[in-house]
Image (cartoon, rainbow, N blue to C red):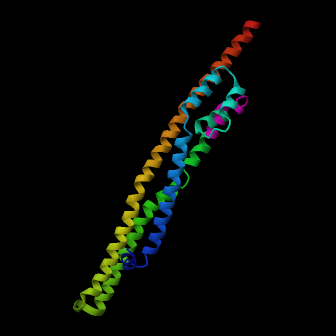
Amino acid sequence: MIEIFHNGGPVMYPLLLCSIITLTIIIERSFFWIGIGMQRNQKLVDEVLNLARKGEWDMVRQKASGSQNYVIKMIISGILHREYSLVKAMESSAVDEINQMQKFMDVLDTMITVAPLMGILGTVMGIITSFDMLNVSGITNPQAVTGGIAQALITTAAGLSIAIITVFPYNYFNSRIKRAAGIMEKYATSFEIVYEQILIHKTDARKEKR
């Protein structure tokens, strides 16, 4: 591998940097989503919604205290700001959660694009080297020419390999983000309906007292 790396020429160094950055982000995002999965607690979400239907806000805060579940955090944000703008508070919380989920995704997207381009750059440099050697030694020394061609092939293969390996986790992480956004939208809508029902009941109760 070391010999192949050196034969690839100077472009292999930025490609190595790209592969290190990509691998680091993939590992970090994998642990992030594992953590998200461990924080998932459907039972707690259902309990919070049931308590919200009854208007027991203090109990909701007690139940959800310390929870890192993104749905719970969004609902709690709505509860804390229900007197002002419940919907906007939940939207703001959801945006914060999505931003955390999208962290470093732009970098992975860039690596998928840049790595093959660097490989092509190495290809061009290798071909230029081959033609230079051909001008110097002519066809009497074919080994001098094949060295440049080998350099071109190695960098292309390396750039494509980085992009291909990166695109699978990139698409997986994006699918998780879309799924999480859909879940938050679902529960935000449910909680908004619950809160509107509470307000209607309160208004009806006041009318009856009058």
Asked whether the viewer can see residue 81, the reply is: no
Asked whether the viewer can see residue 163, the reply is: yes
Residue 63 located left or right of residue 160: right
Tag count in the figure? 0
Give 65 or 141, whichever is nearer the viewer.
65
- Residue 79 within the magenta-colored segment of the rendering: yes
**107 w.r.t. 185: above or below:** below
Residue 127 located left or right of residue 110: left
Residue at horizontal 54%, vertical 43%?
Answer: 36
Indicate the position of residue 22 as horizontal and vertical percent values: 48, 61
Indicate the position of residue 72 as horizontal and vertical percent values: 61, 35
**165 w.r.t. 37: above or below:** below
Residue 186 located left or right of residue 194: left
Residue 210 located left or right of residue 134: right
Residue at horizontal 32%, vertical 73%?
Answer: 153
Of the 4 image quadrants, the one containing the N terminus is bottom left
- Residue 160 within the magenta-colored segment of the rendering: no
Residue at horizontal 32%, vertical 79%?
Answer: 127
Residue interval drawn in magenta: 78-93
Of the 4 image quadrants, the one containing the C terminus is top right
Indicate the position of residue 15 as horizontal and vertical percent values: 44, 70
Give 198 or 57, whichever is nearer the viewer.
57
Indicate the position of residue 57 as horizontal and vertical percent values: 70, 26
